[in-house]
Image (tube, grey):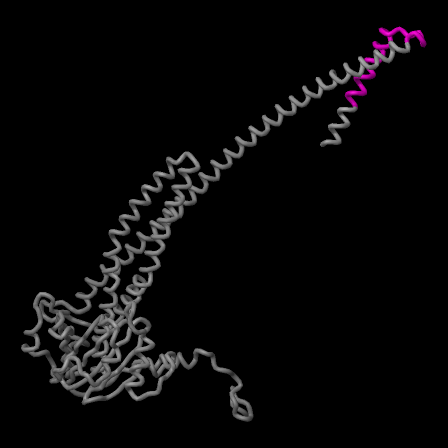
Amino acid sequence: MTAIGTSEASEPLFADHPGRAAIYAELHARPTEPIAISARIRRVAFMPGSDGPSLEDVARRFALFAGQSALPFEDARTRHITVERGGRKATFELHNEFATLTWQSVLTDREPWPDDIGLDCFAGLQRVSATRVDLTETHAISEAALVGFSPISLCYSELYDGRAQVATDFNRDRDGFTRYELAAGQCNVVRRGVLVRRLLEIETYSNFVLLGLPVARALASTIRQFEGAVSQVMGRVGHAHSTGENREALEAIHALSADVGRSIEETSFRFAASQAYAAVLGTRLGQLVERPIGEFTTIDRYLTNRTNPAVATCLATEKRLQAVAMKLERSAELLNAHISLSLETQNQTILDTISRTSESQYRLQETVEGLSIIAISYYALAILGYMIEGVSHIWHVDKAIAMLCAAPVVLFLVWQGIKRLRRHAA
């Protein structure tokens, strides 16, 4: 009996989906490191600039620094690399938009930027966030640690029903790091690692959420200009009468639509990213299970009060841009309909003019044909009169009677001849 999915030669009967390996790699990516003792953990998040190296370049640099061969960028091993240098454990993590370097050392480590953990691999990138978590094995955060925080923005809370305490004021220290104090003496080593990772992620994602806010603020004046220009263009659409005015209004709409479309293209990713980071941030904040200590606030409340308005501003800005684009689209449709109706009216006028001209020409032609029949018949009868007069003394024919009889026949023959010529010409 053979196992299901294998042949007698123990060869798989089924081919793996191309994404199966990546799925399993993602399930085990960025594992939580247990922390057994007091430690100082720092994390810096970088993202590429417009003219700097790409994340792919940085991943390859760090892989070479860690002693790995130049692995493909898609390889899961290039997305999470851990090295130990100089008593510090450094971990490189690659995300879709940014990369982080996290290093753990003893609590007394005063060096903010060690030169032996691969920080130079990130040269040319832009720093977005820098976080420092001081983890102690005590049950509560010491008064000495709290003194360094600003009481105005201090967040001080219990975690997991009082088994841990966390404090931060979200201010940067002199080295540029946001400091968190974490007392987790009642937590096991795995829980400590989870808490540290949650705090690092919260600081990182909150910064990336807020990246969309400066973009939205900078775009506010531009949107006001767009909205004013749209109002002017729509006014021109309503008062344009000539084809030239309609054409000018349509060109203005197309130019404005191009500008609005460019703004949407340049900002849509940033706004969508802020919303995505906000969703992840909300999940991470909920996992802390905070309870404020004394009259202080929690990290969840503090960040939510700032990130939610920022995301709402990004959404409102995006909707305003979309509304401007929709107005321009409707204006273009209205103007095109107006132009089509104007052209149809002009064409109908031209056709009516042509019709009247053709009718006049037809009547003139009939008049000319009638005159031609009379003229030709007159000359034909004159010639016939000369002929009758020449033979009247031979045949004893009365000229007047002969001309009277011949006149209707000549008129009929001339009319038939001209009618045949006209039919042939047609």
Please tell me in which quadrant of the rendered image residue 75 appears.
Answer: bottom left
Of the pair 157 and 111, the residue shown nearer to us:
111
164 with respect to 423 (left or right): left
Magenta highlight on residue 407: yes
Number of callouts in the render?
A: 0
Q: Name the quarter where the N terminus is drawn.
A: bottom right
204 with respect to 378 (left or right): left
82 with respect to 86 (left or right): right
- Residue 11 coordinates in the image, percent (x, y): 52, 90
Vertical side of 283 occupied by 79: above or below: below
Of the pair 56 and 426, the residue shown nearer to us:
426
Of the pair 91 and 390, the residue shown nearer to us:
390
- Residue 82 coordinates in the image, percent (x, y): 27, 85
Magenta highlight on residue 229: no
- Identify which residue is drawn at 24% across, 51% down: 221
Main structural element of the magenta stretch: helix, strand or loop? helix
Vertical side of 106 occupied by 415: above or below: above
- Residue 18 coordinates in the image, percent (x, y): 46, 79
Q: Name the quarter where the C terminus is drawn.
A: top right
56 with respect to 195 (left or right): right
Residue 423 visible in the displayed image: yes
Please tell me in which quadrant of the rendered image residue 102 appears.
Answer: bottom left
Vertical side of 90 occupied by 294: above or below: above
Residues in magenta, as a range: 392-416
